[in-house]
Image: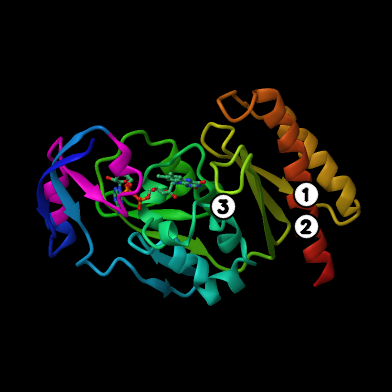
Amino acid sequence: MLTIDTYLRPKSLEEAYEAMQKKNNAVLGGMLWLRLGNRRIGTAIDLSALGLDQVEDAGNAWKIGAYTTLRTMEMHTDLQEEFRGVLRNCVSSIVGVQFRNLATVGGSVFGRYGFSDIVTTFLALDASVELYKHGIVSLEEFCGMGNVKDILTHIHLPKFPAAAAYCAQRNTVTDFPVLNTCAVLRNTTLTVTVGARPLRAVPFRFEICNTISAAEQAESIAKQISENTIFASNARASAEYRQHLCHVLVRRAVLEVLQKKEAE
Ligand SMILES: Cc1cc2nc3c(=O)[nH]c(=O)nc-3n(C[C@H](O)[C@H](O)[C@H](O)COP(=O)(O)OP(=O)(O)OC[C@H]3O[C@@H](n4cnc5c(N)ncnc54)[C@H](O)[C@@H]3O)c2cc1C
């Protein structure tokens, strides 16, 4: 059971940061993951007075506030247009609408969950995280940082991908993914991420060659990634099944982006 001793709604990020430095204090997101834990929180820090629930056009990037809900991101027309619908696709199987109306983008990224559909997609989109004290760091670096005592304020998503596609496999519709992948093409650089291995998502980068057919490139990239990724077994699937899925899902996602690009 989760127990909270006191509640704080800071008026500034500095006040929130100071408060979270104490060992048993914790920042609240939508509390959907947090509430499942068996821990005692000294002071629960609610950031809802700090205006972090906005999606902003910041010129070359979209800036998503940490308290933006998954549902807001999913329903944001400009974000769907910019990122070819992958932000909607990657969250659409996460439990249900009521759940996504509460779960926050910040809580989803800060947890860096291995099963995450969101981290897999943001990594492929070359996202950066803005931390109050550490500043802006790439999501890839943040994923390797271990325990961080800081406040995630925003996610930055650089604009102008040429094409993007998201694919995942679930045993039942709203269960955790057995495997997920996202492919994003920027100029001739293709980034493909594989997550829910069930380990944390990993990115791969390739240069696309215009003289080879989309089908051949997709097959070759799927083979390379599935043979060079570490998979593990858990209650949902074996490592062998995940490797097989990886080949199939990566091939589909890569083919989709290459065909989208060809069609333009
Ligand atoms: C039953 C269930 C099923 C799920 N299925 C999926 C799924 O299929 N795919 C998927 O991708 N995800 C899934 N999730 C994860 C979910 O989408 C959210 O990512 C998760 O609930 C965390 O978001 P939250 O807003 O609830 O954060 P919380 O639970 O409130 O917080 C999570 C952690 O992040 C910290 N935190 C929150 N916000 C900040 C911040 N701004 N700065 C610093 N620290 C912060 C908290 O202290 C806590 O440690 C599932 C979760 C549950 C409970």
Q: Disc 3 marks which amino acid? A: Thr
- Of residue 112 and residue 71, the one placed in the foreground of this image is 71
Q: Within 10 angstroms of label 2, few (less than 14), some, or many (20 or more) residues?
A: many
Residue 64 lies in quadrant: bottom left
Q: How is the image coloured?
A: rainbow
State the mark number for residue 180. Answer: none
Image location of residue 162, percent across then percent down:
69, 65
Instruction: Tally the marks.
Output: 3
Q: Is residue 34 left or right of residue 69?
A: left
Q: Secondary structure at mark 3?
A: helix
Image location of residue 184, percent across then percent down:
66, 56
Q: Which region is colored magenta?
A: 16-37
Residue 37 lies in quadrant: top left
Residue at the spot of label 1: 252
Residue at the spot of label 2: 256
Which residue corresponds to the image point at 38% horizontal and 55% vertical from the top-left? 103
Q: Secondary structure at mark 2?
A: helix
Res 193 seen here:
no
Magenta stretch encompasses residue 263: no
State the mark number for residue 121. Answer: 3
Res 90 seen here:
yes
Which residue corresponds to the image point at 62% horizontal and 26% vertical from the top-left? 231
Circle nearer the N terminus (3, 1):
3
Q: Is residue 54 left or right of residue 225?
A: left
Quarter of the image with the C terminus is bottom right
**Tag 2 near tag 3, CB within 8 Å:** no
Magenta stretch encompasses residue 26: yes
Q: Within 10 angstroms of label 1, few (less than 14), some, or many (20 or more) residues?
A: many
Q: Rounded to the nearest whole Å, what is the CA distance between mark 3 and mark 1?
A: 15 Å
- Of residue 57 and residue 99, the one placed in the foreground of this image is 99
- Does the residue tagged 1 have its C-beta within 8 Å of any atom of ligand 1? no
- Of residue 100 and residue 17, the one placed in the foreground of this image is 100
